[in-house]
Image: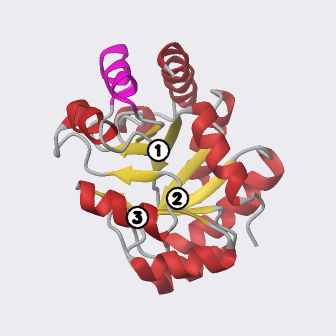
Amino acid sequence: MAKFSRLEVYQAMINTGMVPVFYHADTEVAKQVVKACYKGGIRVFEFTNRGDFAHEVFAKLLKWTDKICPEMIIGVGSIVDAPTATLYIQLGANFVVSPLLNSDIFKICNRKQIAYSPGCATTTEIGYAQELGAEIVKVFPGGNIGGPSFIKNIKGPMPWSRIMVTGGVEPTEESLSAWFKAGVTCVGMGSNLFPKEVLKNQEWEKITELCQKSLSIIANYK
């Protein structure tokens, strides 16, 4: 069972404006990254289904997070089919994110009252996702399908759209200000928030600093 309600998930995404996107095969590394983000003010975290036995890492991470970072909302990303969504929901995922739109995943998530943000790249997909019940639609890959101007042009005829953009987001004033001025509700940020050298050297405080810096910038443009 999800610890947080669908409403709580969406509200946290809206309030913070940022969702870290991360995968690592080592549970201990994943724990330290979540803790560093938590210290930096993050309250929604997407662990991606990117490797073999990723669900086992997720299960351990979620149980640990519930005790150590009790306000952190952990969800799963990179989900492309309903059976995998079901597996992670059984393990306690609080929300599900996809790189694509899959109507079967909507059926699973809606039945269990789990937040689902499908990946969309066209106005038609965004509209269909909203028809199926998406409160926050993921636009992906944001940097490749038009950048901030794409979001601005979507919001023109569809101003009610709440959009989380992932792909092409950097933890800088230039990048974040452009996306939020264009009208995004929140951003998903992956590798730019977790530089390889930082992970290799276990410099967790640098991740905390990047999160704090990013949230501070976002707060000025929300």
For label 2, the residue is 26
Closest to the observer, 153 or 3: 153
Q: Does 182 lie within the magenta span?
A: yes
Segment tinted magenta in the rendering: 170-183
Above or below for 8 versus 39 = below
Above or below for 104 versus 55 = below
Q: Amino acid at mark 1?
A: Arg
* Residues at marks 3 and 2, CA–CA distance in whole angstroms: 34 Å
Most prominent secondary structure in the magenta stretch?
A: helix
For label 1, the residue is 162
**Element type where label 1 sits in the image:** loop
**Is the N terminus in the top left, top right, bottom left or bottom right quadrant?**
bottom right
How many tags in the picture? Answer: 3
| Residue 42 falls left or right of residue 123 | right
Q: Does 117 lie within the magenta span?
A: no
**Element type where label 3 sits in the image:** helix
| Residue 94 falls left or right of residue 202 | right
Q: Amino acid at mark 3?
A: Ala
Checking the image for residue 129, the label placed there is 3
Above or below for 33 versus 64 = above
